């Protein structure tokens, strides 16, 4: 995982808009969030991916597929996944972005699992990343207090045995598309003076409606995915849900009759990091020793679209315990350095090839 070091507290926000630490904590549970400075979605995704490759002790050249779940890509095109692929030197990997709002990472995880189950792919890198601070209206107190930036990544590979992803489900209800939307900047409303003046390139949310949607859909998704996996809800050791609002998590726990101890909660530190929130919470739970081999986990996301997704899995081993040989880390560092040189070299060769073609054309015309 990667989160920017720059921290924005509720008190900092109270100096910008009419809000207070007390209101934000009471209504959301959020105390601070991390905000990108020089970082972009691609640079944070690259950091998180490198951390995942290190923990798994994997060679970036063995990765077959990279899926980056994000609603805040560096560019409308190319995909952020291609920028990640290039920086990692993942020369055999396909790369694609996936936008399912805050459900993006869980969607990507489910789809990566299908890609592996089909036999088509063996090693898939799944990243959830978001730089929401760049699309937040910092004058809108109803949204700017909620979000933060960051990235989390996991590596999925084929494995023997009964551990791993047991079941997944994906859901969507596009009739709620307007509830969480960045109205301008796409093909419906391309950027113009009017869209900028109308602040239409910023995120807008009907918080109350999204709240109602979340508390309805999340408990149902957890029950359904548990059933698909052959589990009872009480058999789930840990639920890693999208970190939007502590009150949503409490409502879900109440609806499922589960204690809050079964839920990972880290939104007080990071706020809502959209597609990055589930992988960041997962990485922290691993680092804190909250996830043990043999445990059953449910990851669940919900958000823009509207979308929701859930994955039930059995944790096989604690990767942090595996000692990665020092020279493997050194080799990866050399590969990343080489990847940067390779990019420059390929760009130079491309420029030279184009220049060569132009010269040949000029010669052809003058003779
Ligand atoms: O990640 C994607 C999914 N997103 C979510 O899950 C977000 C779901 N929604 C929520 O978490 C909550 O709806 C919010 C935290 C966004 C808002 O909480 P709420 O309890 O639903 O508040 P509200 O929107 O009903 O607003 C209540 C009052 C309003 O004032 P009036 O009209 O009652 O006088 C707002 O103007 O609180 C006011 N308010 C604020 N006051 C101080 C709204 N934002 C703020 C603020 N500080 N930052």
Image: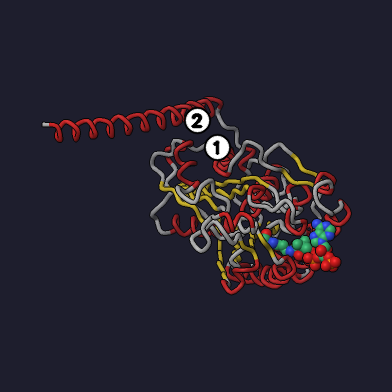
- Determine crowd level at label 1: few under 14, some 14-19, many 20+ residues with C-alpha closer than 10 A: many
- How many marks the image carries: the answer is 2
Q: Is residue 265 visible?
A: no
Q: In the rendering, at what x and y percent does residue 365 appear?
A: 15, 35
- Which residue is painted at 72% across and 51% down in the image? 138
Dot 2 falls on a residue whose secondary structure is: helix
Of 326 and 29, the residue lying toward us: 29
Q: In the rendering, at what x and y percent does residue 114 appear?
A: 46, 59
Q: Which residue is mark 2?
A: 332
The image quadrant where one finds the N terminus is top right
Name the quarter showing ligand 1. bottom right
Mark 1 vs ligand 1: CB under 8 Å?
Answer: no
The image quadrant where one finds the C terminus is top left
Against 233, is 192 above or below?
A: above
Left or right of residue 36: residue 189: left
- Asked if the residue at tag 1 contacts the one at tag 2, i.e. Cβ–Cβ closer than 8 Å, the answer is yes
Q: Residue furthest left?
A: 367
Q: Quadrant of residue 3?
A: top right
- Which residue is painted at 61% across and 71% down in the image? 176
Q: Quadrant of residue 219?
A: bottom right
Q: In the rendering, at what x and y percent does residue 183 appear?
A: 59, 62
- Which residue is painted at 73% across and 47% down in the image? 270
Dot 1 falls on a residue whose secondary structure is: helix
Left or right of residue 336: residue 37: right
Q: Which is more N-terminal, label 1 or label 2?
A: 1
Of 164 and 104, the residue lying toward us: 104
- Which residue is painted at 46% across and 41% down in the image? 85
Against 36, is 110 above or below?
A: below
Q: Is residue 354 visible?
A: yes
Q: In the rendering, at what x and y percent does residue 252 appear?
A: 75, 67
Q: Which residue is mark 1?
A: 50
């Amino acid at each position: 995982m990667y989160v920017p070091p720059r921290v924005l507290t509720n008190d900092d926000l109270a100096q910008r808009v009419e809000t207070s630490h007390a209101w934000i904590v009471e209504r959301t549970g959020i105390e601070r969030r991390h905000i990108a400075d020089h970082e972009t979605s691609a640079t944070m995704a690259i950091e998180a991916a490198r951390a995942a490759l290190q923990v798994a002790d994997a060679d970036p050249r063995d990765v077959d597929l990279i899926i980056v779940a994000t609603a805040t890509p560096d560019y409308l095109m190319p995909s952020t996944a291609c920028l990640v692929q290039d920086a990692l030197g993942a020369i055999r990997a396909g790369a694609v972005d996936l936008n399912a709002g805050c459900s993006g990472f869980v969607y990507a995880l489910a789809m990566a699992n299908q890609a592996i189950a089909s036999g088509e792919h063996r090693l898939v890198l799944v990243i959830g990343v978001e730089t929401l601070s760049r699309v937040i209206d910092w004058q809108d107190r109803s949204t700017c207090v909620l979000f933060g930036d960051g990235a989390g990544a996991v590596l999925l590979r084929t494995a023997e045995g009964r551990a791993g992803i047991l079941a997944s489900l994906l859901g969507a209800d596009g009739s709620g598309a307007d509830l969480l939307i960045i109205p301008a900047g796409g093909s419906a409303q391309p950027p113009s003076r009017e869209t900028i003046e109308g602040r239409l390139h910023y995120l807008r949310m009907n918080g109350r409606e999204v709240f109602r949607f979340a508390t309805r859909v999340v408990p149902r998704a957890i029950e359904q995915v548990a059933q698909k996996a052959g589990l009872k809800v009480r058999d789930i050791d840990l639920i890693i849900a999208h970190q939007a609002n502590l009150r949503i998590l409490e409502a879900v726990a109440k609806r499922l009759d589960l204690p809050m101890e079964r839920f990972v909660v880290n939104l007080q530190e990071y706020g809502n990091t959209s597609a990055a929130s589930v992988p960041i919470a997962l990485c922290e739970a691993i680092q804190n020793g909250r996830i043990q081999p043999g445990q059953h986990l449910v990851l669940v996301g919900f958000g823009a679209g509207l979308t929701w997704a859930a994955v039930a899995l059995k944790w096989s081993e604690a990767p942090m315990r595996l000692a990665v040989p020092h020279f493997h880390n050194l080799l990866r560092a050399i590969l990343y350095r080489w990847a940067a040189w390779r990019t420059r070299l390929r760009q130079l060769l491309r420029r030279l090839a184009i220049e060569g073609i132009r010269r040949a054309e000029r010669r052809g015309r003058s003779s």
